[in-house]
Image (cartoon, rainbow, N blue to C red):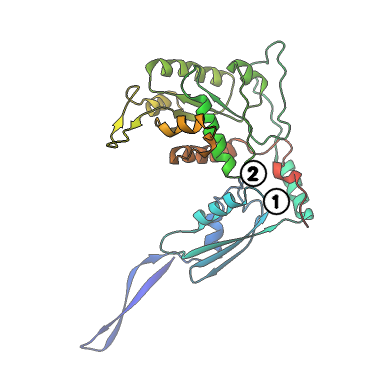
Amino acid sequence: MRDWLQEGVNTQEGALVMFRTGLCPVVDKNLIMERLKNVLDPEIGRSIVDLNMVRDVMVDDGNVTVKIALTVAHCPLAKTLQTDVENAVRKPGDVKSVRVDTTTMTRKELEELRLRLQTAATPSSPPKNAPMVGPGIERLGKRGIRSIIAIISGKGGVGKSFVTSALASDLRKRGYEVGVLDADPPLTVFQSLPLDGVIVVSSPQDLASMIVSKAVNMAKKMDAPILGLVENMSYLNCPSCGERVNLFGEPKGEKLASSLGLAFLGAVPVDPSIARLSDEGRIEDYSSPIITSIADELRIRSAKQVEQLTQGLPIAWSIEPTH
């Protein structure tokens, strides 16, 4: 930290007076590196500092330039990473601007990182008391898929398909390759797929809350990591006056999530544009700050839940580096 000093002159005695007006952190390379430790590579899910992706940091009078080495040229998630770096570095009052330049790791650097990740990766083994796969059900492998997330509710009509498509579209816009699989019943999904996380969808009705609770209990018994709960059709914003109308009763999502020991990811309102875009086959054009915030939370929580692919490699490394 450094003191900001200000000069003042006593006009009667001609004395020079120095006095403190506050404290401000010294913006240098060490401070910027400390902030960058909180930035996770969106593909690998680890700190870009730990992965040695930060190649240079320059600070000039509050203007910061960060050079990042990507694991693959033209990485589809480069923009997401750049935004995360800018948000982490920029702090009001001490950083004026942030510039993020990118380069690409060499083949040798990729191989060294590959070995580090494979060495650090711990083979996953099922808990001693984990339920066995049912008769006639084959346990499937991930086959290079980064994360498998299940969207469940336990009943129909709460909007699982909408939440799934909205989240998939939002993640696709960020550069992720996303696939959607309609799989029933839930028990078979838990037994046959190596899930990295579960998102629970509910709605304000009492019946929905009761059935969702049963679905959550089943997920817990199957040792499926639950990322959180989303309440769909939570309310309606009146298009005329803007008043919030509770069409299906008082929203219960946050309270329900708390009672089940889950994170509350957000409340999605009834939006007429959803039906219109669905009818037109353009649901991917739907945009909502709530869905975006849920996708952000999903990305962060998924990265923390999954330390590394079983192969120790991100998907993008299937693409050869350019040098």
| Amino acid tagged 1 | Thr
Q: Secondary structure at mark 2?
A: loop
Left or right of 125 in this view: 268: left
Q: Nearer the viewer, residue 4 or 247?
A: 247
Determine which residue is flagged by label 1: 71
Left or right of 313 in this view: 2: left
For marks 2 and 1, the one nearer the N-term is 2
| Amino acid tagged 2 | Glu
Q: Which residue appears at 54% of the width and 60% of the height? A: 32
Determine which residue is flagged by label 2: 43
Q: Secondary structure at mark 1?
A: loop
Within-10-Å neighbours for mark 2: few <14, some 14–19, many 20+? many
Residue contact at pointers 2 and 1, CB within 8 angstroms = yes
In the rendered image, is residue 264 in sight?
Answer: no
| Residue furthest out toward the front | 280
Q: Is residue 44 above or below residue 253?
A: below
Q: Which residue appears at 51% of the width and 25% of the height? A: 160
